[in-house]
Image (tube, rainbow, N blue to C red):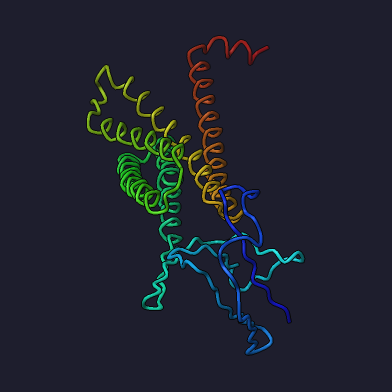
Amino acid sequence: MRGEVGLGMRGGLSDGEVVPGEGDLYVMNETIIRPNPSIVYMIFQLKTNQPSSKLIYSIGPNGVFPDTQGMLQQHSDAISTVIDYSQGETSEVSYLKLRRSHGVINMTSWSILMIMGYIIARHFKKWDPIWFYLHASIQTISFVAGTAGILIGYALSKKVDANVNNHKNIAIIILVLGILQVFAIILRPKPESKLRKYWNWYHHYIGRILIIFAIANTIYGLSLAKEGSKWFLAYGISIAILVIITIILEVRMWIVARRKTQSTNNSSHPQSLEFAYQT
């Protein structure tokens, strides 16, 4: 059984600025304890002339062993540890739950639920007025939850001091588009109004643009958070299912509209139909 503590000096953010074996810490009294064949504990002491209240260290995921090169896998969490030397105590602050709450809320609200509301409004109007109340309810929940998700994201960026300006700028665009949709509902003209046609264009296309920005920003946010492929796969499958449903409904709507057009044309030219039949 072999264990090793690796020290390094972090001179910057790039890999080349991390110098192995350098730094102002000294490792001493390394001990390995093996309570059973499947668990190994390593105990060591760090000695330094100028103790720091902030210490950066790496811990691999629980239950996962290093690879053949002795390298730990990508860490799934970022924890800040504050050391109180006078009391001999430490305190840890982790933002993993807050980060994932931000991601899940925004993924569900701005893209998945918004797409569902769009599908209901476009393809289920024959169920009037149920479709309208269902569409309005889903989009309202999406907007409220999405706004909360964006606020969580802003709070998170301040806590971790992350440089995610592009991600935040896109989120602002999404929020503005959502607010425009709220005003669209408030100022909705009556069906017989001459402005209703233009309102429909505005409402439909603003909603579609919002969904496109939401999907793009979600993918961008997952890449910034360096989440594993499982998150990308789960989100991708969800969006793919909704896109497939949308395509099927669009094709069905096109076929129905085409049949109605053909039926109208045929009924308006009865003599031509009779002549064609006799021939």
The residue drawn where x is 24% and y is 25% is 189
Compared across the picture, whether 53 is left or right of 262 comes to left
Q: Position of residue 232 (x, y in %)?
A: 58, 50
Work out whether residue 126 or residue 228 is closer to the camera in this orientation and state it: 228
Compared across the picture, whether 181 is left or right of 16 comes to left
Work out whether residue 158 or residue 52 is closer to the camera in this orientation and state it: 52
Asked where in the image residue 81 lies, by quadrant, the reply is: bottom left
Compared across the picture, whether 133 is left or right of 31 comes to left
All told, the count of numbered labels is 0
Quarter placement of the N terminus: bottom right
Work out whether residue 65 or residue 126 is closer to the camera in this orientation and state it: 65
Picture layout, residue 65 above or below residue 132:
below
Quarter placement of the C terminus: top right
Asked where in the image residue 80 lies, by quadrant, the reply is: bottom left
Q: Position of residue 31 (x, y in %)?
A: 63, 83
Picture layout, residue 122 above or below residue 65:
above
Compared across the picture, whether 148 is left or right of 236 comes to left
Picture layout, residue 30 above or below residue 273:
below
Q: Position of residue 219 (x, y in %)?
A: 53, 43
The residue drawn where x is 56% and y is 48% is 13
Q: Residue furthest bottom?
A: 35
Q: Position of residue 86 (x, y in %)?
A: 37, 76
Q: Residue furthest right?
A: 68
